Image (cartoon, helix red, strand yellow):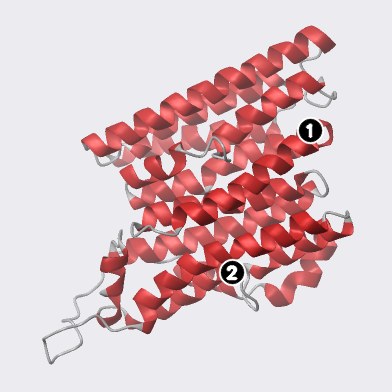
Amino acid sequence: MKPPILTIIMSTVISGTMMVLISSHWLTIWIGFEMNMLAVIPILMKKFSPRAMEASTKYFLTQATASMLLMLGIIINLLLTGQWTMLSTPNPIASNVMTVALAMKLGLSPFHFWVPEVTQGIPLSSGMILLTWQKIAPLSVLYQISPSMNPNLLMTMAVMSVLMGGWGGLNQTQLRKILAYSSIAHMGWMIAVTTYNPTLMMLNLGIYIMMTLGTFSLFMLNSSTTTLSLSHMWNKLPLITSFILMIMLSLGGLPPLSGFIPKWMIVHELTKNNMIAMATFMAITALLNLYFYMRLTYATALTMFPSTNSMKMKWQFENTKNATFLPPLIITSTMLLPLTPMMLALF
């Protein structure tokens, strides 16, 4: 894609999201979602192939259905309350319809089936945008309507998402699908705490975006899309393999890494609100996610790929890929735990 065209498309994607973030009128929020959706499709099809075409079509159909449901919720709310503003409490029926529409946009279970398929069919850079930037707008709307949402509906979707995110990724060898299932599980954790402490959801989103950006950047550095290509990395970029190990364990939520902060705080918040069974179940289900992250770290950093060659190191060519943001991303993805008291004070 030519740079001027990419610039125009990216600025439309960003302005669509910003429009959702700053609006308090339901119609402008809906228009922001539409702008964002229509502009992101050419980014998904950046490297044209039948697979990318199929992924973009799936993305368009699910997002269009979600937009239609969101508009239905907005119209029901308008008819029953006479209000276009977001600040007025939506009608319960409208609130449920909107929650389902936003869950569809986020890829929460049981509307999660498009996420792995779409992520697998597109390039790594497009997958990075899909699993990070595209989550901001729907979660900001959920944050604003959280007082009027149905807690039972949210909790059901959260439990299913955490479960599906763990189960779905167990048998995968494709890195993009693994990250897609990881995204579904993380969204489940965020939605679980929305009813009790929506600000904690935004903290979780921030840390999730940092970790996912770091992971995608490391994969893009070596153009790795499968576990096999990742296992060849040790003799090309030995230092990068140790970074992948750290970020993977952070995504799994192990202390003393950054990924432990949101899980710790969410479990604490749920137990504080007498949701002990829910917190226990989610903590146990997180082990499923940890298992497939451990599989990746084992293949990448803890084993040597069998080689008949006596020379273990590959010939080192100069890496032409720009990795300017990689050091700060690795640091924020792994070393934020000491800042937890400050984050608690802020959030």
Whether residue 46 can be seen here:
yes
Image quadrant occupied by the C terminus? bottom right
State whether residue 240 appears in this view.
no
Q: Is residue 267 above or below residue 100?
A: below
> Furthest-bottom residue in view?
310
**Residue 24 sits in quarter:** top right
Which residue position is annotated with label 1? 150
Residue on which the image places disc 2: 332
Which quadrant holds residue 261?
bottom right
Percent position (x, y) of residue 177? 40, 52
Q: Position of residue 23 (x, y in %)?
A: 70, 28
Position of the N terminus by quadrant: top left
At x 82%, y 59%, the residue is 276
Give how far apart the Cα atoms at labels 1 and 2 are: 34 Å
The foreground one among 214 and 224 is 224
Q: Please indicate whether residue 181 sits to the left or right of residue 44 in the image.
A: right
What amino acid type is highlighted by mark number 2? Thr
Q: Which amino acid is tagged 1?
A: Asn
